[in-house]
Amino acid sequence: MSATIRVPAMTRDQFFDWAETQDSRYEFDGFEPVAMTGGTLNHSDIAFNIHRALHARPRGTGCRPRGLDAGVATVGDTVRYPDGVVTCSPANGVSRLVPDPVVVFEVISPTSGHVDRIVKVREYGAVDSIRRYVIVEAASVGLTVHERQAAGQKWTVTTVMADDLLPLPEIGVEIPIAELYEGVDFPPPVSDAWSSP
C-alpha cells in the first residue's frame, strides 16, 4: 500500500495575500485554499445572533469577540474562520490572526458537519489557549460544547438544549440558548411515515 504525501500549494502568508484578491471566502487547510460555501439564512441568522450575544456581554472583562474575517491559526499553517471567536489578549489591529483565542463557535451546515465535528475538534484542541469549542446546530436547536480546564487536557463534551444557558466561564458570561436562535425559522418536522392517520 502506498501513501500520498501532500505538498503545500502555498504558505500561510501566500494564502493571506491570495485570499485578499478573491470575491469568495476561503479557509486554508495548511496545503491549499478551501472554499467556504454559502450557507442557509438560518446559518447566517445564528452567526449574527452569536456575535450580538458576545458583543453585549464581556464588556469590562478584557475579553473581546472578533468578526467573521478574524482567522484562527490551528495546526501547522492551517487557518480557520469560525462563526464566532473571543480572545482576552490585546491584538494588533492589522493582524490577520486572533491572538490566543479562548472560545470558538462553529455553526454546522449540512456540508461542513464532518469538518466541524471531527477535523476542527482536533485542530482547535491543538491550540493551547482555546478552552471552549461550541458547535451550534443550524437545522434544529442544540449545541455540542467541548471544554477543557487547561492546555493539553482532553475535551469534556456536553450537550446544551433549548431551555438551557450556555456557560462561558472563560470570559465570565452566560448566554441563553434561545438568544442564539432568535428569529430562526425551522421547517416543520417531517411526519412519521409509520404513524397512523
Image: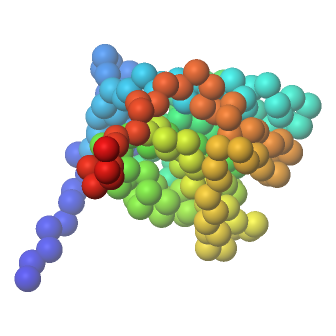
Residue lying at 68% horizontally and 35% vertically, measured from the top left: 178
Return the residue found at the far front.
197
Residue lying at 77% horizontally and 50% vertically, measured from the top left: 167
* Residue 141 screen position, x and y as percent: 55, 42
Relative to 88, does residue 5 appear above or below in the rendering?
below
* Residue 7 screen position, x and y as percent: 22, 56
Q: Is residue 75 left or right of residue 88?
A: left
Q: Is residue 98 visible?
A: no
Q: Is residue 37 visible?
A: yes
Residue lying at 56% horizontally and 63% vertically, measured from the top left: 125
Q: Is residue 173 left or right of residue 184?
A: right
* Residue 36 screen position, x and y as percent: 34, 33
Relative to 22, does residue 158 appear above or below in the rendering?
below
Relative to 89, does residue 114 appear above or below in the rendering?
below
Return the residue found at the far bottom.
1
Relative to 94, does residue 193 appear above or below in the rendering?
below
Residue lying at 86% horizontally and 29% vertically, measured from the top left: 59
The N terminus sits in image quarter:
bottom left
* Residue 66 screen position, x and y as percent: 64, 30
Q: Is residue 18 left or right of residue 156?
A: left
